[in-house]
Amino acid sequence: MAQIRIDKVRKEFGAFTAVQSSTFTVEDGEFFMLLGPSGCGKTTTLRMMAGLDLPTSGQIYIDGEEVGMKPASKRDIAFVFQMFALYPHMNVGRNLSYPLLSQGMSRADANKRVHEVATILGIEDILKSSVNGLSGGDRQRVALGRAIVREPKAFLMDEPLGALDAEFRERMAEELRALHDRMGATTVYVTHDQLEAMQMGDKIVVMNHGVVEQFGIPQDIYDWPATRFVADFIGSPSMNFLEFEGMVGSGYDAVELNGSRFAVPELREGAEGALVLGVRPEHIRFSDTSDYRGMVLATEYLGTDQIVTLETHNGEAKARVSSAMPVSVGEQVGLELDARTLTVFSGETGRALRSAANEGVLGHG
């Protein structure tokens, strides 16, 4: 397998810039997620890794070799598409063996390798079946098998589960991650689904408008978002943003909202004017002793939890609390915010003022 390094890669299509100077590294054996909304540049980045698109500038290294201008056939990677891309006139076994036979492997060795891969994927009983009659899940297993059978340096996957329904998608996500763990393969996986990225990825790059907003492990991206975009995109419900006017500086460890003071992790960067305090719904607690108040606008029952929508002096917020807690629409409740988890954002730039996000510890792009 191989490390993949992207160094200041830029891609332009005429006057449109799809990817803006992206830099990050996929370590050998990682399951790496490229995450973001439609049009953010994630698929273009993947296609440049694969050699299907060539970068306008910058370098791409696979296993230490610069391959930015090499065609896909010279990169020893396997690409798995969303729509399977199987040969409809071939049965499952022939779909799997075709990449090996086309590279000159003997039929006996190819058949042996096909049976090994089919056993790993649990499709040995459908090797003689037509791909046209397969379920979506089996078709995706065959597409994965055709990628795995060549034993490439890396697997590049463009929303490979996007065509499956919710039940199959969740099951295949678990199978795909388990398969990765058994093989130790370097895998780069494109998705717009933040839950899928958090569930499956060792590392995540979050992209927006062609820019790498942040990269790091899922927990760090969730807990310490580098930008307001990342904080909003990751999480369900997403982070709350409480807007206020004021001034913060280096060494500050508290902010004030409507006369109530809230502790925050020490800031390493100052700002003044429009500021935003970010807090996750699960980090808002109801308290009879708090002077900071919110009025209940709505409740949403989720079994053991409920989502409570609140109107505060600093904007609307959602709190995730126990469904056993009695809450009534129109009620005024006191609110406490967990000081360990708060993030202060610049209202002007949207960047977090917390040190880790700004010093690059979490890969702020």
Image: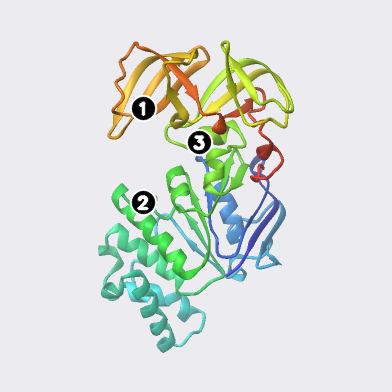
Secondary structure type for disc 3: helix
Return the x and y of residue 139 as percentages of the image width and height.
33, 62
Quadrant location, the N terminus: bottom right
| Residue 307: assigned label | 1
- Amino acid on which the number 1 mark rests in the picture: Ile
Using the image as rendered, state which of residue 93 and residue 336 is in the foreground: 336
Residue occupied by mark 2: 163
Q: Nearer the viewer, residue 169 or 257?
A: 257
Q: Is residue 344 above or below residue 74?
A: above
Q: Secondary structure at mark 1?
A: strand
Mark 3 sits on what residue?
233
Which amino acid, mark 2?
Answer: Ala
Which comes before the other along the chain, label 1 or label 3? 3
229 relative to 60, above or below: above
- Disc 2 secondary structure class: loop
x and y, in percent, of residue 71 in the image = 62, 65
Numbered tag placed on residue 316 in the rendering = none
Closer to the eye: label 2 or 3: 3
Give the quadrant of residue 130.
bottom left
Classify residue 215 as left or right of residue 294: right
Q: Quadrant of the C terminus?
A: top right
Real-space Cα distance between discs 1 and 3?
Answer: 18 Å
**41 is higher (above) or lower (below) than 149:** above
